[in-house]
Amino acid sequence: MNAGWRIPFLNLSLVDRRSCLDVIDQMRISIPDEIKQAKRVIQDRERIIAQAQAEAEKIVTAAQEQAAFLLQEKELTKAAENKAQEIIEEARAKCAQMQSEADRYAVEVLVRLEEELNQQLVTARKGIEALKADHPSPH
């Protein structure tokens, strides 16, 4: 709006009232639209930020759940490995005990067998001596 008259020696200008009112009317019309558009932009921005925050929270929650799952899985694996080691050690101890008991039993059986065989041998020798005594040999 450069349509106006300058007053000499004063730093003033006269403007056409109608032109000023037209400009003001145009501003009244366009400014509410611009304000509405700015509000929409702000609402869209806030909505996008809220969606981004919700997505970030979902990602963090999923990461925390995954970390907890992996930690639990690791603990379960470690517990299973410890239990397996205990079972192996128990089995080895039982095996050693059973082998020791089996060896002891075998020794007992063999000692009894030896005693019985010795008794059988003594009996056989007595029988031979008795037969020899009853039937002396011609030599």
Image: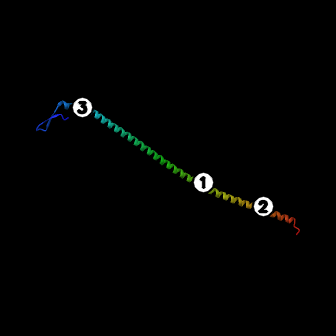
Residue 94 or 128: which is nearer the viewer? 94
Residue designated by label 2: 120
Near-viewer residue (50 or 98)? 50
First in residue order: circle 3 vs circle 1 = 3
Q: Residue at x 85, y 64 (%)?
A: 131
- Between 10 and 52, the one lying in front of the other is 10
Residue 116 screen position, x and y as percent? 75, 60
Q: Tell me which label, 2 or 3, sits earlier in the chain.
A: 3
Give the residue at the far top of this rendering. 18
88 relative position to 46: left or right: right
Measured Cα–Cα span from mark 3 to mark 1: 96 Å
Q: Which residue position is annotated with label 3?
A: 26
Task: From the viewer's perspective, tell me whether residue 61 is left or right of residue 12.
Answer: right
User: Residue 24 occupies which quadrant of the picture?
Assistant: top left
Residue at the spot x=56%, y=52% of the render? 84
Q: For this view, does 95 lie left or right of residue 39?
A: right
Of marks 3 and 1, the one in the foreground: 3
Q: Marks 2 and 3, Cα distance to the nearest angstrom? A: 137 Å
Q: Is residue 13 above or below residue 78?
A: above
